[in-house]
Amino acid sequence: MAVDEWRAQRAEGTWWRRWRPEKDVRAAEVERLNGVLSVRASPSLLRHWAVYVAMMGDDVYEGMSYTELDGPRWELCRSDGEVQTFHDYHRRVSVARISRREVPATENTSGEPAELRPLIWSRNDTVRSRRRQRPLSTPA
């Protein structure tokens, strides 16, 4: 219902007159607990975030959509976090797994995550390039 109301107001161009989120002074907190994200915030803030996340599919650019959380909507990149979706998520994960496997074998590193991340990201380009060059198999 809140998503439908927001979409209608946006389509009419009147959202700025009628939709005014109340100021929420209570802090939000996101923690990673054994691989699970725990999001704690006031009910009003969680409702706003739910609307933003539900509407992510409305604005997809080159297979990716995102929404910022806990920041003013009018100040880009000024929030405390964001939710992202990628249409090619499984392909990205596959490339990253291959890169992670190849980097320690080819690079002389200490194995610290901060040192490995840039090498893995750089290796992703190489892995994607190899995949594009792979010849298509022909049926027998």
Image: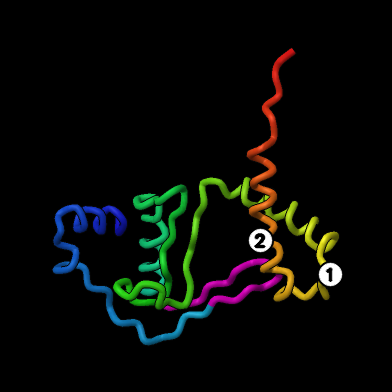
Q: Secondary structure at mark 2?
A: helix
Residue 77 in sight: yes
- Which of pointers 2 and 1 lies earlier in the amino acid sequence? 1
Residue at the image position 66 percent from the left and 55 percent from the top: 124
Residue 74 percent coordinates (x, y): 29, 73
Foreground of the two, 82 or 88: 88
| Quarter location, residue 79 | bottom left
Q: Secondary structure at mark 1?
A: loop
Alpha carbons under labels 2 and 1: distance apart: 15 Å
Residue 126 on the magenta span: no
Which amino acid type corresponds to the residue marked 2 in the rendered image?
Answer: Ser
Q: Is residue 33 above or below residue 65?
A: below
| Quarter location, residue 56 | bottom left
Image quadrant occupied by the C terminus = top right
Image quadrant occupied by the N terminus = bottom left
Residue at the image position 15 percent from the left and 58 percent from the top: 13
Q: Main secondary structure of the magenta part?
A: strand
Q: Is residue 106 above or below residue 132?
A: below
> Which stretch is magenta?
30-43
Instruction: Name the residue that disc number 2 marks.
Output: 122
Q: Residues within 10 Å of mark 1 (few under 14, many from 20)?
A: few
Residue at the image position 48 percent from the left and 73 percent from the top: 81
Residue 61 percent coordinates (x, y): 40, 51
Residue at the image position 39 percent from the left and 50 percent from the top: 60
Display colour scheme: rainbow
| Left or right, 16 with reference to 118 | left
Residue 22 percent coordinates (x, y): 28, 78
Which amino acid type corresponds to the residue marked 1 in the rendered image?
Answer: Asn
Residue 32 on the magenta span: yes
| Left or right, 94 with reference to 1 | right
Instruction: Name the residue that disc number 1 marks.
Output: 108
